[in-house]
Amino acid sequence: MAEKNRLRMETGKVYGQEEGSMSVGRGRVKEMTGRFQKTVELSPEAIFWIEEDGQIYDVNPQACRSLGYTREEMLSLFLWDIDPYFHPRRWSAHLKNVRKDKKVLLETIHRHKNGRTFPVEVSATQVSFDDREFHVAFVRDITERKRAENTLKESESRFRILMERIPNIAIQGYTFDRKVIFWNHASEKLYGYTAEEAQGRDLLELIIPENLKDHVAQEIQHMGESGEPAPANELLLKRKGGTAVPVYTSHVLIEEATQPSVFYSFDIDLSNLKKAESERSKLQHELEQSQKLESIGRLAGGVAHDYNNMLGVIIGYTELAQMKLEGSGLLREEFTEILTAAKRSRDITQQLLAFARKQTLAPKTLNLNEAAEKTLKMLRQLLGENIELRWHPKEGLWPVKIDPSQIDQILTNLCINARDAIDDIGRITLKTDNVRLDQTFCDRHPGVRAPGDFVMLSLSDDGCGMDPETLESIFEPFFTTKGVGSGTGLGLAMVYGVIKQSNGFIDVSSEPGEGTTFKIYLPRYGEWPREEEKNVGDGVAEGQGETILVVEDEVAILRLTTKMLEDLGYNVLPATSPSEALRVAEVGSERIDLLITDVIRPEMNGRELADRLLSNYPQMKCFFMSGYTENAIVHHGVLDPGINFIQKPFSRKDFSVHIRDILNS
């Protein structure tokens, strides 16, 4: 112990603690060592001189303050008394490292006199004095730094957890050579790769459009060089398995002084948005289609009433003329052509009304197989010998409710369309089936109102097919790919209107050179008809002297109708207006068996006139006729129950049969 004290006295010279007088040469040393001693005493770092056996040889004042000991107490301690990590065995290894590297920087723990521990940073070196080695340690309290580091780590941990768990935003971290270093749960869900599978992948592997890969690579390079983030944009990226997903992506640049810069991509899945935009576009298209329907409906309604009246006159008088000339052969061919042209004009008007959903329907519960089979012979004649018509009916087909005449219209127009798409020789396949449509199907087809059971009627051809632009327009009125004079462009528009009016929908698929398939879906109707439809036969039904009141404001039609009825054997009371009809009824006859009136009347509609007359003639029956009906006798285009109606223009035979059926009922 005396020897250690002597050495402390000697090393004290380092602090300027010399004994005795100094020579003039040593005066300079005294001045310098005094300054050094002052520096050591004022140092904010704790300084320790430690002997090879681990005992503390000397300390500066800061060391005493940091640990709470006096200098005398400190000089009696060993290193492991103040540093619980440095036990004797570790101390020996530490000395070897310091001798080898000359200087060692490390972090450890010091223990205060009161037992409290705190983190320190130690810079250790070896010094020699008087043939002895001392271990000198410069110690800095890093409690605040560690607290800040821990706070930063906690913040980083919370931030990482947030990025990992944030829903609906796929976050990836990339180095500037585009390699994945971070991949959160939302990225796993969006792209299908686990974080392990994604590590090290190149961002460009996810990009689908080849022409965008170079552009994205250049943007990333520019971001790394300039420090400016790349602009946010939309990209089409690739999921695991190859499926595409549209995303909106933006970037955040992270620059750190001690680590390579990275950037983070924040991707938002646009699939639902794109789907909504597509559905909105379809709904917009349907709205525009509906507006076209309304416009055409108003036009067709206005034209049809007067136009059909005139056609009725042409058809009626042509038939009467043919009757008078029957057997003579005179002008037979000419009148036949007139009648054919008039009926063709009538069909065009009916197509307009069908597309605009302004037809008056008399729907019946029927078997679609039976209704289609009735038209097969006519369809085969229409198609000719070069086109094969195949028929595949589904057994046990569910019933549907539709106007039977509309089945003929649908099949005829679809077959004509298919025939024109086939180059000379080909095949048309017609089939039916029961289908159950779910919500997924409804989501993909906005025209389907709700899931449920439907009867499907499909017609496929092996013709030239259609491109997407043509498919977009095929149901628009007056749209046609045929040459001038070869079609009106109303056939498919009529089919569309008829199906919509019957609460169904139509789906079309086609590819150029691959043919076309039309699928018509009609809702299943739960009840089969109890009675079979009446077969009216082919002849004209004669009258039996019944009295018929005819009300028609178009004089030509009134004259024609009166003449037709009188020729059939009826007693006719003609009137040009509802008020005249009421006067004629009061004085003209004690009995009126049948009222025939146009639905649309200037003073009162046909329904109101019938109600007025029925109070005086309760046995009277009513027969409505019109070229265009309003809601007087129909609701949503369907005849009210018990209403007898005939669409203008009509033939003499149809007119006579309807009247006979009404009077006999």
Image (tube, helix red, strand yellow):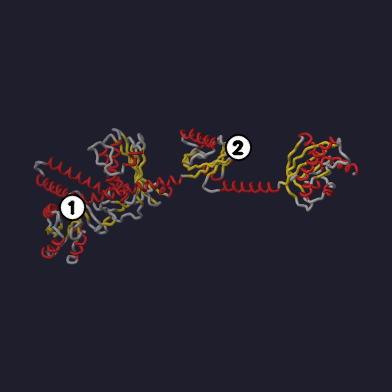
User: Mark 2 sits on what residue?
Assistant: 260
Q: Which mark is residue 655?
A: 1
Tell me the amino acid under the disc marked 2.
Pro
Residue 497 screen position, x and y as percent: 30, 48
Looking at the image, residue 641 lies above or below residue 319: below
Report the amino acid beneath label 1: Phe
Q: Is residue 123 left or right of residue 224?
A: right
Task: Identify the image quadrant of the C terminus.
Answer: bottom left
Secondary element type, mark 2:
loop
| Residue farthest front in this picture | 24
In the displayed structure, does residue 233 sit left or right of residue 123?
A: left
> Mark 2–mark 1 contact, CB under 8 Å?
no
Q: Quadrant of the N terminus?
A: top right
Q: Position of residue 539 (x, y in %)?
A: 17, 49
Looking at the image, residue 588 lies above or below residue 381: below
| Relative image position of residue 453 (x, y in whole percent) | 39, 51
Q: Quadrant of residue 14?
A: top right
**Depth order, front residue of 111/339:** 111
Q: Is residue 396 visible?
A: no
For the residues labelled 2 and 1, the Cα–Cα distance comes to 92 Å
Label 1, residues with CA under 10 Å away: few <14, some 14-19, many ≥20: many
**Residue found 79% across the figure and 35% down from its top:** 99
